[in-house]
Image (cartoon, rainbow, N blue to C red):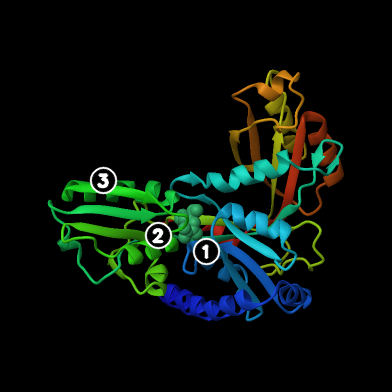
Amino acid sequence: MLLLDISALAIQVSLKKVSNFGRMSQVDRTSLANNQTMVNIAFLGPLGTYTHQAAIQQFPNEDANYIPLKSIPQCFEALIKDASLDYAVVPLENSTNGQVVFTYDLLRDLMNNCKEFKGNEALPELEIVAEQYVSIELCLIAAQPMSLNDLNSKTRVTIHSHPQVWGQAGTYLKGLAQKVQELKTVDASSTSGAVKICCEEGQPSNNEVVLAIASRTAATVNGATVIDSPINDRKGNTTRFLTLRRRSTDLPPIPARPPVTKGVQRVALLTFIVKQDNPGSLVDVLNVLKDHEINMCSISSRPYHYPNSSSSADENARRKWQYIFFVEFNHADDISWDQVVHEIGSKTLKFCFWGTFNRNERYYEIST
Ligand SMILES: O=C(O)C(=O)C[C@]1(C(=O)O)C=C[C@@H](O)C=C1
């Protein structure tokens, strides 16, 4: 509860900073970015999203300007193109329903469309510099004060939220669907955006109710009412966020939170494609990690398509059912990077190291 109050307060403070930023010209914003004391952080907005909370956790100081953008792709695009932005914070995965596929696919596309290579190592415009964890306590929210008891067998309910939420409150929504006449879910670009839509739509009629699922902070920011909470199926529901920046940045290394002490685990993300028809091609890459006593902590894949520019004579370029792999691993400070990179390069068709960052201590929290 205390945590929520603090975050609501932080969001009020950041609201002021956001509106100031919005009025600045591009030149002002660039000179602001050049002023070492200010950092400009893009995030999936509007204010009150869980990503906003992650951005505040990552950059809690007075010298942070938070810039809400409309979608995850816009966060990537703006950070690449707008030199006045220093960082972008985006969601990566949820402890209940897994990958935020938008982010995975944007990383894939950046590697795929990369113009700069060292051998077969892609060097895309962005890198990952930190991770954050935010507790996701979902609330059912109405524009006007009302009670859960107002929903009955005659009510037709429409609920707006970010698509990532449906899998986190599936059981709750099934229960609610049995209580009302009809329940419809509508995707929004973010949870706080969903509350905004709910407030704009109001209540169409006595038997029709428009609701949203979002955080308590999003309800406060939009002047809406929480009618039920927490509604997530699993206690301890948590989303993991990444902080990105341009590889070419002049910024000093991101301050480590908690401070780097000897023994803090480092984490790296590697993406790659292999010759799919060669038996053992994936195992060969993983064996490089094993040989260097590097512990893999996650592996996942997404569909992969060769870049549109590939020669049409190349059969691989036209095949379906190919995959890009995402592997995260812990490593000691003294691993022989050059050797690891060389060996990974020799076992993959194309690969990318997205950066190496401190493991956030909240990674180790267990559900109570
Ligand atoms: O919509 C938001 O509030 C977000 O920050 C996005 C997002 C996500 O994409 O996973 C973040 C956390 C929750 O899991 C739901 C939505």
Q: Which mark is residue 194?
A: 2
Q: Residues within 10 Å of mark 1 (few under 14, many from 20)?
A: many
How much space separates mark 2 and mark 3, taking CA atoms? 20 Å
Spot occupied by residue 349 in the image (x, y as percentages of width and height): 77, 30
Q: Give the mark nearer the N terminus: 1 vs 3.
A: 1
Q: Which mark is residue 358?
A: none
Q: Amino acid at mark 2?
A: Ala
Q: Which mark is residue 174?
A: 3
Instruction: State the quadrant of the N terminus.
Output: bottom left
Residue appearing at x 75%, y 32% in the figure: 309
The secondary structure type at the circle numbered 2 is helix
Instruction: State the quadrant of the C terminus.
Output: bottom left
The secondary structure type at the circle numbered 3 is helix
In the picture shown, does residue 192 fall above or below 349?
below
Residue picked out by circle 1: 45
Is ligand 1 within 8 Å of the beta carbon of the residue shown at mark 2?
A: yes
Residue 264 falls left or right of residue 132: right
Q: Give the mark nearer the N terminus: 2 vs 1.
A: 1
Q: Amino acid at mark 3?
A: Lys
How much space separates mark 1 and mark 3, taking CA atoms? 28 Å
Q: Mark 2 against mark 3, which lies toward the viewer?
A: 2
Q: Amino acid at mark 1?
A: Gly
| Residue nearest the observer in this picture, 12 or 264 | 12
Residue appearing at x 21%, y 68% in the figure: 146
Spot occupied by residue 192 in the image (x, y as percentages of width and height): 43, 63
Spot occupied by residue 108 in the image (x, y as percentages of width and height): 66, 41
Is ligand 1 within 8 Å of the beta carbon of the residue shown at mark 3?
A: no
